[in-house]
Image: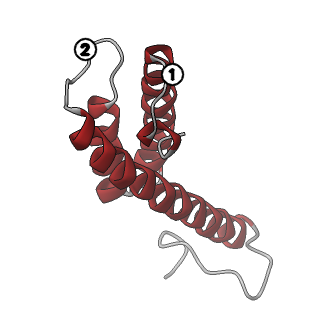
Amino acid sequence: MLLIAMGRQPYSYYQFLRWIVCASSLWFLLYAIRLKALGIALVLGLLAVTYNPLAPIRFGRGTWAVVNVVSALAIAVSAMSVVRLSRGSEKRRDRVAHPNDPNARKRDDEVA
């Protein structure tokens, strides 16, 4: 959607784009915070502020073209990182959750 915005679109498209990008950035931001990925959370927070539909930031057309490309890349990298971190935390949680498994890690409170 961000890359499509580089062409001429009706103003309603850009309004809709702000809502989608802001909402998806906030959703991934909350998930990144839960995973303690604070660098990713910072990037997503900046995107949410940039695309905030309630208090819009005004840029010229050329500036928005650059912002849209950078934002598309940032969202793609952040989303892949959050998914990768999420899968890693699920594996760790599974390993600790089964104490009878001889291959499972011991939690800090069980090591003595």
Front in this rendered view, residue 107 or 36: 36
Front in this rendered view, residue 11 or 81: 11
- Location of the N terminus (image quadrant): top right
Tag 1: Cα neighbours inside 10 Å, few (<14), some, or many (≥20)? few
Residue 25 placed where, x, y %? 44, 38
Residue extending farthest to the right is 100
Residue 66 placed where, x, y %? 28, 50
Residue 56 higher or lower than 71, as above or below: above
Which residue shows up at 72% across the image and 66% down it? 94
Front in this rendered view, residue 71 or 79: 71
Residue 85 placed where, x, y %? 54, 65
Q: In the rendering, which numbered label is found on residue 55?
A: 2
Write down the residue under mark 1: 13
Which residue shows up at 22% across the image and 42% down it? 63
Q: Please indicate whether residue 55 sits to the left or right of residue 73 in the image.
A: left
Residue 22 higher or lower than 67, as above or below: above
Residue 71 placed where, x, y %? 37, 49
Residue extending farthest to the bottom is 103
Q: Please indicate whether residue 94 sits to the left or right of residue 38 in the image.
A: right
Q: Please indicate whether residue 71 sits to the left or right of residue 101 in the image.
A: left
Residue 75 higher or lower than 45, as above or below: below
Q: Which amino acid, mark 2? A: Ala
Tag 2: Cα neighbours inside 10 Å, few (<14), some, or many (≥20)? few
Q: Which amino acid, mark 1? A: Tyr
> Mark 2 vs mark 1: which is more N-terminal?
1
In the rendered image, is residue 41 in sight?
A: no
Q: Secondary structure at mark 1?
A: helix
Q: In the rendering, which numbered label is found on residue 49?
A: none
Q: How is the image coloured?
A: secondary structure
